[in-house]
């Protein structure tokens, strides 16, 4: 095997495991096949697995070229990624992260750097589309190996058909199978010894069909790249029987093939049954068979007049030597019959029915998790209340939310590498912090907007009902956090804005008088300051208080 290319992020002194389990770690990326070594080792049919994945990716990309499938993919991508001229499609959310403001600021700066390296504002649509169609996406994190503390210098996209993910068991000096998993000592659970797994990628510059022997992986066929050098994000769908990663287009393969076949058969049926054809019964008397055939042929050539339109030249010519299935029938009739007769064969009667086409179109959309109401794009848009939202649209919005969560793993991996290389955090810190780092995507879904507006209305109504009890049963801080659902950043921001508007005279000072906008009368407790804004920062509160004898209480005080 050739040496690994790239870099690895590891602890200098690995700690011995304190928690022991007989179950090996699970792999959520679908790579459950291992390349084993040793005297008793046997190779798994990796060639067949990668051959299957190669074919699957190729099929997914062919499916995306179909008009109906492309329309469904565009619906999903447009819902998940919203491109705005004024705002970024995705932002990092650190309100749940328990860290200092300096660390949060550095994390936001590094995430902005990653978005700039990806050119995400301009390429977000195609990046997400490539990930959704292939079911995976790969980026090579290019760093300066002499100065790794400078972080990621470049992010280069790698075609999924040119790279493969491999797990290989390392051969150890003490390869005694007596202490392996199958022969565990019941008295000492610490004797569970799982084989050490080496993870790496095989990069092939040319997207060739995988035909190499699994034992020759890493030879001249490709370049071994370290696991930490590649950002690897999958769809999360795994075929556990074959150990391969699938795309969300996988379950639509059958529906799309059925739609293609039914459309092709419909075209053939209409071309063959659309015209009316005539049947000529020619009386041949008692002529012998050969002379009867010759007589029938002479009559047919005498009365046949086939005019052909040449689409290339625009000419109309007479081609009597050709006869197709769409033309008339000439049948001989013996003596004793009714003589020469001409009848008409009617065309198809149900040529206008496309019920089966619509059925398979809806089936295709359902297999792609797109609401069937979006098929064809007919009908207007309902601007009513969110209670009128179709259940399919609610399911679709949840599906898009799951896709966003899964796609965010790409940002997580890049951000982790950037923060570790710049020594902003340690690997142990990242294990704790990663669960509290979230990514907010822009929304333009109308149903989501209706839902948010109704939620805000309900929260304001609840706040109005709870307002007389502030200072008695509830604190002002509780009302803002639990009922209005305001975060720490929103509370601080709103307090600063309110403070500024009070100084500018835009709104009256609540410490002096609070007027009910509905009645125009002073509200209860206005002069006592029970309904004042919660104090998040002492310096802000000090500025908002003008009379020295009136002191605003902090949130939670009565």
Image (cartoon, rainbow, N blue to C red):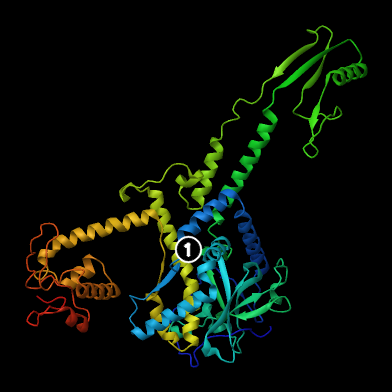
Q: In the image, what residue occupies the spot 28% across and 55% down?
A: 454
Q: Nearer the viewer, residue 26 or 254?
A: 254
Q: Measured along the vertical axis of the image, is residue 202 above or below residue 457?
A: below
Q: Nearer the viewer, residue 520 or 121?
A: 520
Q: Position of residue 178 (x, y in %)?
A: 56, 83
Residue extending farthest front: 505
Q: Position of residue 430 (x, y in %)?
A: 42, 82
Q: Residues within 10 Å of mark 1 (few under 14, many from 20)?
A: many
Indicate the quadrant containing the N terminus: top left, top right, bottom left or bottom right: bottom right
Q: Secondary structure at mark 1?
A: loop
Give the residue at mark 1.
83
Res 462 → quadrant:
bottom left
Residue 203 falls left or right of residue 435: right
Q: Measured along the vertical axis of the image, is residue 93 above or below residue 10?
A: above
Q: Is residue 198 visible?
A: no
Q: Measured along the vertical axis of the image, is residue 374 above or below residue 324?
A: below
Res 463 → quadrant:
bottom left
Residue 518 falls left or right of residue 363: left
Res 291 → quadrant:
top right
Q: Position of residue 544 (x, y in %)?
A: 17, 78
Q: Is residue 497 visible?
A: yes
Indicate the quadrant containing the C terminus: top left, top right, bottom left or bottom right: bottom left
Q: Nearer the viewer, residue 178 or 287?
A: 287
Residue 475 falls left or right of residue 194: left
Give the tally of numbered discs: 1
Q: Position of residue 212 (x, y in %)?
A: 72, 71
Residue 292 falls left or right of residue 407: right
Q: In the image, what residue occupies the spot 19% across and 58% down?
A: 461
């Amino acid at each position: 095997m050739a040496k690994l290319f790239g870099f690895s992020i590891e602890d200098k002194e690995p700690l011995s495991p304190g928690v022991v389990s007989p179950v090996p770690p699970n792999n959520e990326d679908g790579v459950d096949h291992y390349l084993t070594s040793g005297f008793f080792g046997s190779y798994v049919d990796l060639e067949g697995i990668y051959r299957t994945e190669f074919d699957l990716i190729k099929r997914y990309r062919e499916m995306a070229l179909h008009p109906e499938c492309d329309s469904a993919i565009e619906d999903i991508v447009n819902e998940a990624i919203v491109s705005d001229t004024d705002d970024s499609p995705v932002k990092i959310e650190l309100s749940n992260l328990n860290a200092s403001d300096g660390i949060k600021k550095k994390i936001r700066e590094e995430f902005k750097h990653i978005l700039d390296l990806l050119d995400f504002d301009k390429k977000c649509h195609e990046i997400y589309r490539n990930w959704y169609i292939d079911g995976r996406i790969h980026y090579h994190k290019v760093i300066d190996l002499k100065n790794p503390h400078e972080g990621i210098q470049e992010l280069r996209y790698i075609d999924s058909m040119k790279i493969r993910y491999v797990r290989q068991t390392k051969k150890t000096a003490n390869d005694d199978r007596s202490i392996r998993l199958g022969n565990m000592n019941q008295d000492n659970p610490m004797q569970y010894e799982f084989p050490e797994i080496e993870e790496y990628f095989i990069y092939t510059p040319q997207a060739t069909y995988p035909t190499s022997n699994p034992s020759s992986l890493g030879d001249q066929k490709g370049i071994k790249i370290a696991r930490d050098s590649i950002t690897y994000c999958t769809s999360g769908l795994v075929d556990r029987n074959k150990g391969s990663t699938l795309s969300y287009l996988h379950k639509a393969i059958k529906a799309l093939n059925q739609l293609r076949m039914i459309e092709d058969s419909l075209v053939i049926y209409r071309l063959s049954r659309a015209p009316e054809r005539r049947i000529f019964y020619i009386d041949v008397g008692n002529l012998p068979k050969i002379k009867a055939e010759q007589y029938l042929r002479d009559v047919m050539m005498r009365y046949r007049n086939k005019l052909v339109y040449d689409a290339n030249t625009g000419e109309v010519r007479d081609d009597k030597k050709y006869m197709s299935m769409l033309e008339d029938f000439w049948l001989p009739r013996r003596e004793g019959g009714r003589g020469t007769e001409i009848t008409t064969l009617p065309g198809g009667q149900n040529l206008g029915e496309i019920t089966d086409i619509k059925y398979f179109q809806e089936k295709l959309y359902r297999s792609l998790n797109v609401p069937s109401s979006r098929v064809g794009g007919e009908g207007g848009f309902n601007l009513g209340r969110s209670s009128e939202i179709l259940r399919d649209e609610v399911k679709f919005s949840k599906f898009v939310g799951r896709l966003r969560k899964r796609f965010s793993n790409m940002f997580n991996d890049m951000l982790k590498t950037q923060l570790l290389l710049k020594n902003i955090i340690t690997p142990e810190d990242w294990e704790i912090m990663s669960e509290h780092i979230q990514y907010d995507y822009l929304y333009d879904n109308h149903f989501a907007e209706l839902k948010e507006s109704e939620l805000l209305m309900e929260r304001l109504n609840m706040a109005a009902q709870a307002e007389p009890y502030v200072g008695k049963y509830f604190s002002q801080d509780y009302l803002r956090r639990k009922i209005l659902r305001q975060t720490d950043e929103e509370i601080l921001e709103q307090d600063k804005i309110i403070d500024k508007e009070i100084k500018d005279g835009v709104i009256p000072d609540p410490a002096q008088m609070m007027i009910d906008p509905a009645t125009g009368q002073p509200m209860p407790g206005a002069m006592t300051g029970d309904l004042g804004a919660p104090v998040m920062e002492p310096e802000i509160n000090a500025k908002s208080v003008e009379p020295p004898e009136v002191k605003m209480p902090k949130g939670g005080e009565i």
